[in-house]
């Protein structure tokens, strides 16, 4: 013999399924609407999150890292005179407990580059190629050759700058910069290779030379920055505080302070996601509510007859709520499955190269790849169940309040 509670649940479920099946056309349209809404929310959220994470990647990989350390006042006057001593053993000791993908020491100073025909202002970056697996340098397509090691005294230019200077690989160019004594020096470099980048601005303004070779020209063994990249997409909790404590004499700057405009855009995306969720689910709950109000009105006499024969008001309430939950549950499952299929099709990303200027302005990669954030999926699931209850509440209360005699007379 069935337990009374199980019998009651079975009865409510049977009545709900029967009522939904009686209005197959309307409920099918409602179900398809729910599936489309959930699919749209999940897919669009994944694309927005992908765009958001690519914003971070563009800053982090673009010679910045998650956190960059400078000597005080370097950012206001980026000169070799505002540098600090490189001590690899000390850096290794202080950073070994952190979950880092790696760290790199660099020299970044302004310079003027002159070819036999043109002159341009650039930022000269002295690097150790071995350390640059943490940055975009490791993935730059190169024509010619890249720097062999940090003692390489050749130079690598961006393709856009090479075009502006009207020179070629193998030719020599002259860089004018200030040494450790704040005196202008002119140094000749042979062009070893040309790199291509998604950012034309980087191609025009950033040139690479060996760090040790640049130190020799400048008369200094110092560096201007220590760049750190974590193994995680974002800075771990307390990561910034830990590094600040380990390097009290240096200015510690995270990626948000390096590019505050992009950081603001990153935070704005979070708000945009929740606003989008609110708009879609608000529209959905009104559609669902309207459908179930109509269903209750169509079944006025039936509900009145059941109540006159002794059906409890709570049973009528549970019946209407269960119908709403069944529709939303099926819509949720269908929407998530359809979303998964769409995201599989978009796995290689959406090519935005046709809008290159706008994409570059937003500091995005030419392809936006979707990124699934499980927190967003959980919000969709919880919101779906909650809105199913909200949408069914008014129709259910209306059904409970029906006077059996008035309902039968109507």
Image (cartoon, rainbow, N blue to C red):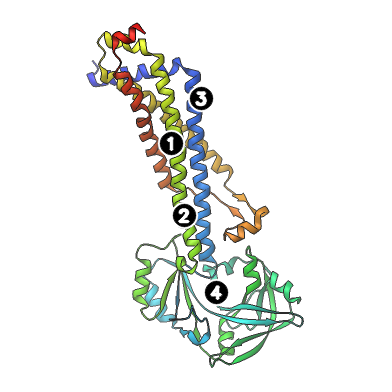
Question: How many C-alpha atoms fall within 10 Å of the one at disc 3: few (<14), some, or many (≥20)?
Answer: few
Position in image of residue 339 (x %, y %): 51, 39
Q: Secondary structure at mark 4?
A: helix
- Relative to 181, is 325 above or below? above
The local crowd at label 4, few if under 14, some if 14 to 19, many if 20 or more residues have their Cα within 10 Å, is few
Q: Do the numbered discs 3 and 2 sit on residues whose CB atoms are within 8 Å?
A: no
Given contact means CB atoms under 8 Å apart, are the residues at marks 3 and 1 in contact?
A: no
Looking at marks 4 and 2 on the same chain, the residue that comes earlier in the sequence is marked by 4
Q: Residue 6 in the image: state x and y as whole percent.
A: 26, 21
When asked about the image quadrant of residue 366, the answer is: bottom right
Of labels 4 and 3, earlier in sequence is: 3
Camera-near label (4 vs 2) is 2
Quarter residue 386 falls in: top left
* Residue position marked by numbered label 1 in the rendering: 282
Report which residue position mark 4 lands on.
130
* Residue 148 in view, yes or no: no
Gap in Å between the C-alphas at discs 2 and 1? Answer: 21 Å
Residue at image mark 3: 29
Q: Compared with residue 94, is residue 287 higher up or lower down, i.e. above or below?
A: above
Q: Residue at x 65, y 57 (%)?
A: 356
Q: Earlier in the sequence, mark 3 or mark 1?
A: 3
Q: Which mark is residue 268?
A: 2
- Front-most of residues 120 and 151: 120
Q: On the rendered structure, is 149 left or right of 143?
A: left
Is residue 398 or residue 42 the one in the foreground? Answer: 398
Q: Secondary structure at mark 1?
A: helix
Nearest to viewer (mark 3 / mark 2):
2
- Label 3, label 1: how far apart the Cα atoms are: 18 Å
Q: Residue at x 59, y 85 (%)?
A: 213
């Amino acid at each position: 013999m069935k337990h009374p509670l199980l019998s009651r649940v079975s009865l409510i479920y049977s009545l709900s399924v029967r009522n939904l099946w009686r209005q197959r056309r309307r409920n099918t349209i409602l179900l398809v609407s729910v599936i489309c809404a959930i699919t749209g929310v999940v897919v669009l959220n994944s694309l927005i999150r992908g765009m958001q994470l690519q914003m971070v990647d563009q800053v982090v990989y673009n010679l910045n890292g998650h956190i960059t350390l400078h000597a005080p006042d370097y950012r206001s006057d980026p000169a070799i005179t505002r540098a600090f001593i490189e001590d690899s053993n000390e850096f290794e000791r202080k950073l070994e407990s952190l979950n880092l993908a790696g760290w790199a020491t660099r020299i970044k100073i302004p310079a003027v580059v002159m070819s036999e025909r043109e002159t341009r202002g650039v930022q000269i970056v002295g690097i150790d190629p071995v350390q640059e697996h943490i940055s975009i340098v490791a993935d730059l397509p190169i024509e010619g050759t890249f720097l062999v090691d940090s003692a390489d005294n050749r130079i690598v230019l961006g393709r856009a700058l090479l075009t502006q200077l009207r020179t070629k690989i193998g030719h020599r160019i002259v860089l004018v910069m200030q040494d450790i004594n704040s005196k202008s020096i002119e140094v000749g470099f042979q062009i070893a290779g040309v790199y291509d980048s998604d950012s034309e601005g980087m191609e025009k303004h950033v040139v690479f030379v060996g760090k040790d070779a640049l130190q020799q020209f400048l008369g200094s063994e110092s560096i201007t920055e220590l760049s750190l990249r974590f193994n995680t997409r974002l800075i771990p909790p307390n990561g910034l505080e830990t590094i600040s404590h380990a390097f009290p004499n240096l200015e510690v700057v995270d990626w948000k302070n390096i590019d505050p405009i992009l950081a603001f855009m990153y935070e704005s995306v979070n708000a945009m996601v929740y606003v989008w969720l609110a708009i879609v689910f608000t529209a959905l709950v009104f559609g669902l509510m309207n459908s179930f109000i109509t269903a209750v009105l169509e079944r006025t006499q039936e509900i009145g007859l059941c109540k006159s024969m002794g059906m409890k008001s709570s049973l009528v309430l549970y019946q209407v709520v269960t119908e709403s939950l069944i529709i939303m549950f099926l819509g949720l499952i269908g929407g998530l499955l359809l979303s998964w299929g769409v995201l599989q099709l978009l796995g290689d990303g959406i090519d935005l190269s046709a809008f290159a200027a706008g994409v570059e302005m937003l500091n995005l990669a030419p392809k936006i790849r979707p990124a699934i954030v499980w927190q967003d999926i959980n919000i969709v699931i919880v919101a779906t169940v909650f809105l199913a209850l909200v949408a069914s509440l008014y129709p259910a209360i209306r059904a409970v309040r029906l006077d059996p005699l008035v309902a039968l007379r109507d």
